[in-house]
Every structure is written in C-alpha cells, then in structure tokens.
Image: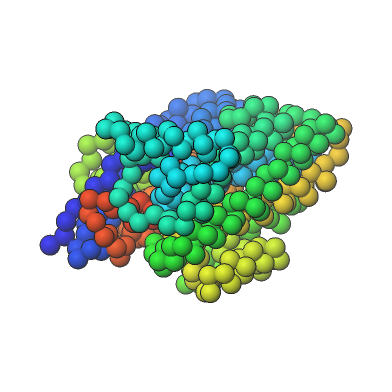
Amino acid sequence: MAKTITIDPLTRIEGHLAIRLEVEAGRVVKAFSAGEMFRGFEVILKNRHPMDAQQITQRICGVCPISHGTASILAQDEAYGIKPPPNGRIVRNLILGANYIQSHIIHFYQLSALDFVDIAAVKDYTGNDQQLRALKGWIADQISSKVMYPAAPFLPRYEAKYLENAELNIAAVKHYLQALDMRAMAHQMAALFCGKIPHAPALIPGGVTEKVTADKIAAYQSRLQKLQQFINECYLPDVMALAAAFPDYLRMGKGCGNFLAYGVFPEDADHSQMLFPSGVMSNGRVNPFNPTQITEDVRYSLFSSPSGLPPSQGQTEASPHKHDAYSWLKAPRYGGQVLEVGPLARILIAYAKGGNAEIGKQVDAFLAQMYGGPEMLVSTMGRHAARAIETKIVADRCAEWLDQLIPGEPTFRDFTIAETGRGVGLTEAPRGALGHWLDIQNGKIANYQCVVPTTWNCSPRDDRGIAGPIEQSLEETPVEDENNPIEATRVVRSFDPCLACAVH
C-alpha cells in the first residue's frame, strides 16, 4: 500500500510549491505538483493602457522581470507593426543575457548546490580565506546549538548522503559566497542599459530608451570578463564535479522526454536567426514550432474558465473551491503533448539542430566526462549541466554583441499605439518558454494572457489525467528514507521552479 509524503512548502525555490508523493517499496509511483496561491495579473491588466503592460508584467517576478518585460514589448512590437533598430535589438539581448547569467548562477549555488554540498565540512577548514574562516566558527556553533532553525539557509536540512570530498566541499562553499557577488555584477551589467534592476523602465516597444555610449560598453565589458572567468573556472567545473560524484542523478528525473523552445536572442531584425532556435522535440526528433498548437487545460486547476482554450482566447476565472482541482496552475499542452521547457530543452534542441558549433562542443565535452550519450542530459544532473553550458554560451555571445553596438546610433523606433490590434510575444525566460498574448480594443487592453515556464513544468494533470513534466519526472524516483525525501527535492529543484511566475 502506498504511503503519502507531502513536502509543503518545498523550499529554496521562487514562491510556494507543494509536492505530494505516493511511495511504494521505496519508489515514487505517483506525484502531484501544486501551486498554492492566486495573484491575478491577467485580471489586473484588463482595461489598462497597453504601455502599462511591460511595467506591470515585470512585477510577476523579481528574478526574471526582464523576460516578462521582453515578452510584453515583443507582443506590442507585433501589435504596433514595428521593429527595433540594430542597436535596440542588441541592447535587448545584452539586458536579457545579463539576466540569464545572474539567474543561472544563483539557481545553482544558492538554490540547488546545498542539496549536494556538505556545509558541515567548513567547520574543519584550516585555510586563510577570511570569509570561510568566519563562516567556519558560525557553522560550528550553529551545528552544536539547540536552535530550531539554525544557520539558515544552510541548516536545517535532510539527513542524506552529501558530497564526501572535503576539498570539493570547501571550494563549493567558497564559490557559493562568490556567486552572490557575481549575481550583483550581472545585475549591474543589465542596469547599465535598462535603467535599474529589477523591473527595468527602459524596456519599451520599438527598442529601449537607454543610449549606447562607449562608457557603457566598457563598463559592461569589464564586468562580463569577471563573470566569464567565474563561469569557466568555478561554475562549469563545480557542475562537472557534482555530476561525477552523484552519477545516479544522471539517470533520475527523466520526466516526459519531450521538449519545447520558442527561440531566444535574435541575431537579425526579422528574428529568423536565434542564438537558441525554436523547436519541438518529440521522441528524439525536432519539428518546427507552431504557436497555434498551444492550449491550456484546467480540469485539475482552480479555474472555472473553459478548458482547452488557446492563450489568444484564454480566460482567467478563479474558482478556489473547485471539486477535485489541486493547483492554481493551468496545464499547458502542445498538440495535446506534455512538454518540458527550460535550459535543457534549449540545449537539446540546439544540439540536435547542429547550427551552433560551440553548443555542440560544450555538450560533447560534458558527455565525454560522463562517458555517455545525449540521453544522459535528460536527467536531474543533466538539467544542471545544460544550465551551466547555456550560461557560458550566453556570456561569450554577450561579448560579441558588445562589439556590434554603434555608440550614438538610435536604440528605438517611434510608433503609434494601435486602437485595435493583437500581438504575441514569444521569448525564453531563464526557466523556459515564455509567451504573452495581447488583445487591444479601443486603445485599451481587452485581454492579456501569460503562459510561463513553470506553468509548463509544474503543471497539474490535464483533462485526460496525464501528469505534468515535474510530476512525471518524480515517478520511479527512489526514496531511501520517507522522513528525508531529499531525492525528490533534488529532482524538483533541477527544474528551477518559479511559482511566483506560475501563479501569476
């Protein structure tokens, strides 16, 4: 008979996620993923001026506001019939690229690495690093104390097997501390071109408001070089080390095995060429992406709006007492399929298409160290590897985009706000495929719908009762100790869930 394990809330993610597991004979047989609140941004936007959209939607998330702002202005670009000039397109890429870098770094070190790194190893540190020496005494005191919540966010934690190599543990903790400075540096890079972070005022339809100057280019470049060094010398090696130390997680958390990417970082005015291309991977094959195939089911969602609607016709009607529903997330599907989104989806689709030699090189290098094929990426640890590889690709490409900027050239085009119009803004947030659907009537927003990455990944069951990506990834996950289900939390955190976005 199955035993039910509830992890509520699942911590060290963005927002409040509840995971319910049914475990038999030490393995998960069923899993349920639930977003536990309602925010109503789509309701707030109704009857607002269209130019409010990119500012209001950025408040959906404090970690990836740039992605929401980008999706919103892309939708307005389409509705108004405008395209940014080259400087505007490149600056948008540089702002979004900086946001990717900070998000991926903080996810690994601050949100996920503590699932694997033994923080207690610091109490035996004998080196001269001042930060580690200060942390050493504090950790030792907290471990021996009777305080209920000592040393947050390091403790309390599940009792489990952690990294056993003392040298790697110390290095990882040191990099944890450095990552906080690296994140701040990436924020500074973005703010140079978007005014401030989070919630950038410079993102507008037609481009950006900030001018390109030689000083801004130099300031961005100097910070980027330090980030590139951290990525190459710390982030990538740390992910590789954890993958080698925990090989079981290269086989756990596989999930649905199908993937979706909208494409991101346009390299031309028409968005026909992307750094990470669009595509749908099903049964190992990549097919063209068709946005008309997206629908949202709500049978098990706490909404009374009709099920199976495309986002362009989507409705947001909360129903908190709905019978049998268990999540405030809808269930997005593509042609009826369950699809995973995120860095793994982007990397796998780009790798399969073969258009970027550097992506191929980085993926092959990881797989060579793990002695496996691309199927090993479809796993808990593979998601971390894909995210680290993507961070390097984005950072290196940002350096090239800087060289393409022309100081003094315009960064936006004038436009007229449409009295009536529709637009779709499709981009990729750090966590995956992000779409905003905009309908303007009589100069006001008549309808606005967002389908965000964690809505895809943390979705509940659809109308046919088929589990969402994270729910499927948890099936067959071993749980050695029902009182310490760390295996399940490691799987879930590999997706980098953002429930703040998902319950928008």
**On-image quarter of the C terminus:** top left
Look at 69% across and 48% down and name the residue there.
Answer: 228
Res. 340 visible in picture = no
Count of marks placed on residues: 0
Q: Position of residue 346 (x, y in %)?
A: 57, 58
Look at 53% across and 63% down and name the residue there.
Answer: 280
Q: Is residue 46 above or below residue 256?
A: above
Residue farthest to the front, as pictured: 126
Taking depth in this image into account, of 104 and 332 the one nearest to the observer is 104
Taking depth in this image into account, of 182 and 419 the one nearest to the observer is 182
Res. 121 visible in picture = yes
Residue 100 lies left or right of residue 377; in this view the side is right
Q: Position of residue 101 (x, y in %)?
A: 61, 45
Taking depth in this image into account, of 23 and 247 the one nearest to the observer is 247
**On-image quarter of the N terminus:** bottom left
Look at 76% across and 39% down and name the residue there.
Answer: 222
Q: Position of residue 373 (x, y in %)?
A: 53, 74
Residue 320 lies left or right of residue 75; in this view the side is left
Residue 117 lies left or right of residue 406; in this view the side is left
Tell me the quarter of the picture where residue 290 sits.
Answer: bottom right
Q: Position of residue 253 (x, y in %)?
A: 39, 61
Taking depth in this image into account, of 261 and 221 the one nearest to the observer is 221
